Image (cartoon, rainbow, N blue to C red):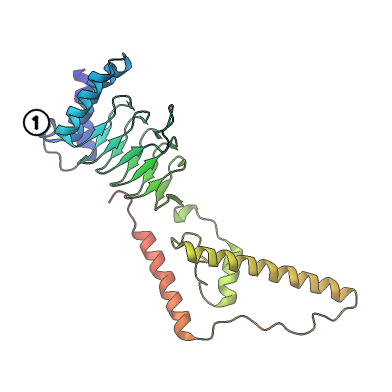
Amino acid sequence: MFERLKEDIQSVFHRDPAARNFFDVLTNYPGMHAIWWHRLSHPLYKRNWKWLARFISNLARWLTGIEIHPGATIGRRFFIDHGMGVVIGETAEIGDDCTLYHGVTLGGTSWNQGKRHPTLANGVVVGAGAKVLGPIYIGENAKIGSNSVVVKDVPVDATCIGIPGRIVVPKSQRKTDDVRSAIAKKYGFDAYAVSDDNPDPVANHIGKILDHMHMMDNKVIELCREVKKLGGDVCDKAIPGLTIDDDDIVKAEQNAARDRTHRHEAFDPQI
């Protein structure tokens, strides 16, 4: 028991630069206190002393502001930073070396019995105010951005942000999309959401429409080529080009595209 307590305290020093000394962590970290209370209530819950286990967990909630259901399974070196408002449901499973910030909910989306809360693999970090809902799986070393709402599985080493949560692909792992680059070059600007990481859903749908238009253009060109081989001349007339001549519109979109890129680069899921 004392070995686990020492391990918990050491994990605080590894993840919180504000921790000053052993006595400071022992007395002033409600996240640690909530975990220790859970270690008392969890075995009682497993042995079917459920009322007593729930009473202890409620006492811990009054004292720490952190609600951990005694049925939840928690691994080693788990750290709750600040902690106020954290809620962890009955069937939640948390691996080793995970970190939760204040306001996090590991909740359910169903009233049915059985597994209804998320599973966090080893090394997961969940930012302040995030909601991870349902019997989903968060892969090892994944990061959940602050105030995100995650309702689908998150793969290993991924970063998930937004409402609903979406996976952010690092720039180093992104593949160049030649088709979208061709669209941007053809129209002379970013074309409102040609970038695939734009958070605006309306802009993303416009981008999909532009993709469709580009594909149809290519099919029409190929069709005209085959008709011409057969002696037809239906494609001799030039199709008017699609261009944006208004300099103000072009500049406005170019600035918007730059702003989206800067916002994406500046994002930190732990803030």
Residue nearest the viewer, comparing 131 with 50: 50
The furthest residue to the top: 47
Q: Position of residue 185 (x, y in %)?
A: 57, 74
The image quadrant of residue 83 is top left
User: Tag 1, which secondary structure?
Assistant: helix
Residue nearest the viewer, comparing 95 with 107: 107
User: Residue visible at 38% across and 69% down?
Assistant: 259
**Relative height, residue 206 to residue 24 (above, below):** below
**Relative height, residue 16 to residue 190 (above, below):** above
Q: Position of residue 77 (x, y in %)?
A: 27, 29
User: Residue visible at 39% across and 40% down?
Assistant: 133
The image quadrant of residue 71 is top left
Q: Callout 1 environment at 10 Å: few (<14), some (14 to 19), or many (20+)? A: few
User: Residue visible at 32% across and 53% down?
Assistant: 268
Instruction: Report the number of numbered marks.
Output: 1
Residue 9 appearing in the image: no
Which quadrant, please, contains the N terminus? top left
Q: Position of residue 137 (x, y in %)?
A: 44, 36
Drawn side of residue 53 relative to residue 234, left or right: left
* Amino acid type assigned to the residue bearing label 1 in the image: Phe
Residue 210 appearing in the image: yes
Q: Position of residue 232 (x, y in %)?
A: 88, 78
The furthest residue to the front: 111
Residue nearest the viewer, comparing 149 with 263: 149
Drawn side of residue 245 relative to residue 162, left or right: right
User: Residue visible at 28% across and 31% down?
Assistant: 78
**Relative height, residue 172 to residue 134 (above, below):** below
Residue under pointer 1: 23
